[in-house]
Amino acid sequence: MRPEKLYLTDIVEAAQAIERFLMGYDFNDFEKNDMLNSAVLQKLTVIGEAASRLSKDFTTRFPEIPWVDIISFRNIAVHEYFAIRWDIAWVAASEEVPVLRAQIEKILQDDFQD
């Protein structure tokens, strides 16, 4: 099995990409830009996939992170693409991902120091 540290790093890197992608854009820009919302959605999917690979023991140690919601969003994005609500994707990407990134960076710093 791949080490949890690598999945956490995947989450941080995807979150950083989302931040770069959204820089200078508002929801109206995002909603109208197929390339932008596709890129952001792909990175949200990466975050959800990485989260789904973390062990139950690990996720239980960090109940403040909404693991189930993160994974559920990924499942909708992959399996029910046409049901995606872009307003929800925007909130996830612009508001929730920066919080998640900070939480994961703290875990990496506190629990995975080499």
Image (spheres, rainbow, N blue to C red):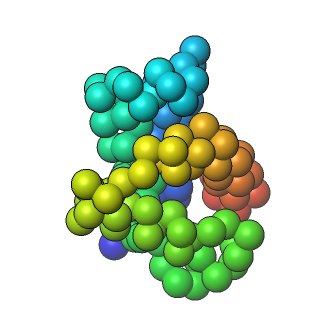
Estimate the x, y position of residue 105 in percent, counting from the top left: 67, 48
Does 18 sit left or right of 42 as displayed?
right
Q: Is residue 19 above or below residue 46?
A: above
Q: Is residue 6 above or below residue 14?
A: below
**In the orientation shown, which residue stands out farthest toward the top?**
24
Estimate the x, y position of residue 84 in percent, counting from the top left: 36, 54
Picture quarter containing residue 79?
bottom left
Foreground: 13 or 74? Answer: 74
Picture quarter containing residue 33?
top left
Q: Give the residue at x 64% y 49%.
A: 96
Can residue 108 be seen here? The reply is no
Estimate the x, y position of residue 35 in percent, counting from the top left: 29, 26
Estimate the x, y position of residue 99 in percent, counting from the top left: 70, 48
Q: Give the residue at x 60% y 37%.
A: 94
Does 42 sit left or right of 20 as displayed?
left
Can residue 28 be seen here? The reply is yes
